[in-house]
Image: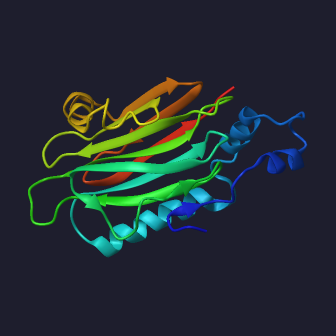
């Protein structure tokens, strides 16, 4: 299993084996079962331990424990990232998060600077019943002074940063964000939340609900 990814992928075959869904199995069926299994097999606990251990190795300072869950019924492929303040620590962004898996990473503030952690990551998936793809944005800010915030949205493939510029996301969206964010597009739903303090979880759940 790739670094920073937790849980056994949930496929159509997984769903058929449960006997809970009528065939033919659809993407929504696979996504629905993944949502039901969000904490199955200790994968959520293992993802949390992973970021907790990264933070322990990192030491003192502002650090954001990022946890992303895929319940889209499709694979999320890493597309791009942006750092406004700080950087990812020790392990890369997960390259692929399959349906039913958690992805995890730690983002930390710039060393020796009076600045917090602020970043964004974009994952790409197929649009349901289409050959086209869409981009999922998950972004967070933990300023040196001020409140924490998250912002998420779903847009067309290649939206970032040519249409949704990083300056716009940071100065208009993140700076006016709260501790929760939700967006829907293409039938998908993206939900994000962040804790308080200088070391906390920032969580994103990407869904394809009925």
Q: Position of residue 100 (x, y in %)?
A: 65, 50
Q: Residue at x 49, y 66 (%)?
A: 49
Q: Residue at x 34, y 50 (%)?
A: 81
Q: Position of residue 91 (x, y in %)?
A: 40, 68
- Quadrant of the rendering where the N terminus is positioned: bottom right
Q: Position of residue 204 (x, y in %)?
A: 47, 43
Q: Residue at x 69, y 39 (%)?
A: 31
Type of colouring: rainbow
Find residue 151 and report its image quarter: top left
Up/down of 26 relative to 85, above or below: above
Q: Nearer the viewer, residue 145 or 170?
A: 170
Horizontal relation, residue 112 to residue 203: left or right: left
Up/down of 19 relative to 127, above or below: below
Q: Residue furthest bottom?
A: 57
- Quadrant of the rendering where the C terminus is positioned: top right
Horizontal relation, residue 58 to residue 123: left or right: left
Q: Residue at x 47, y 37 (%)?
A: 135
Q: Position of residue 39 (x, y in %)?
A: 63, 51
Find residue 162 and report its image quarter: top left
Count the marks: how many? 0
Q: Nearer the viewer, residue 145 or 102?
A: 102
């Amino acid at each position: 299993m790739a670094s920073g990814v937790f849980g056994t992928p949930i496929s159509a075959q997984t769903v058929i084996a449960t006997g809970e869904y009528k065939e033919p199995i659809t993407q929504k069926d696979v996504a629905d079962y993944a949502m039901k299994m969000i904490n199955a097999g200790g994968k959520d606990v293992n993802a949390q331990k992973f970021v907790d251990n990264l933070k322990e190795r990192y030491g003192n300072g502002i650090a954001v424990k990022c946890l992303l869950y895929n319940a889209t019924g499709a694979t999320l492929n890493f597309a791009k990232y942006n750092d406004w303040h700080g950087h990812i620590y020790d392990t890369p962004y997960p390259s692929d998060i399959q349906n039913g898996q958690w992805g995890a990473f730690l983002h930390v503030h710039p060393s020796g600077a009076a600045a917090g952690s602020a970043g964004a990551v974009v994952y790409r998936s197929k649009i349901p019943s289409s050959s086209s793809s869409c981009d999922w944005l998950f972004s967070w800010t933990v300023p040196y002074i001020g409140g924490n915030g998250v912002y998420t949205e779903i847009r067309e493939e290649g939206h970032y940063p040519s249409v949704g510029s990083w300056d716009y996301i940071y100065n208009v969206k993140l700076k006016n964000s709260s501790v929760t964010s939700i967006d829907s597009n293409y039938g998908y739903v993206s939900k994000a939340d962040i804790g308080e303090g200088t070391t906390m979880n920032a969580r994103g759940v990407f869904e394809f609900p009925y």
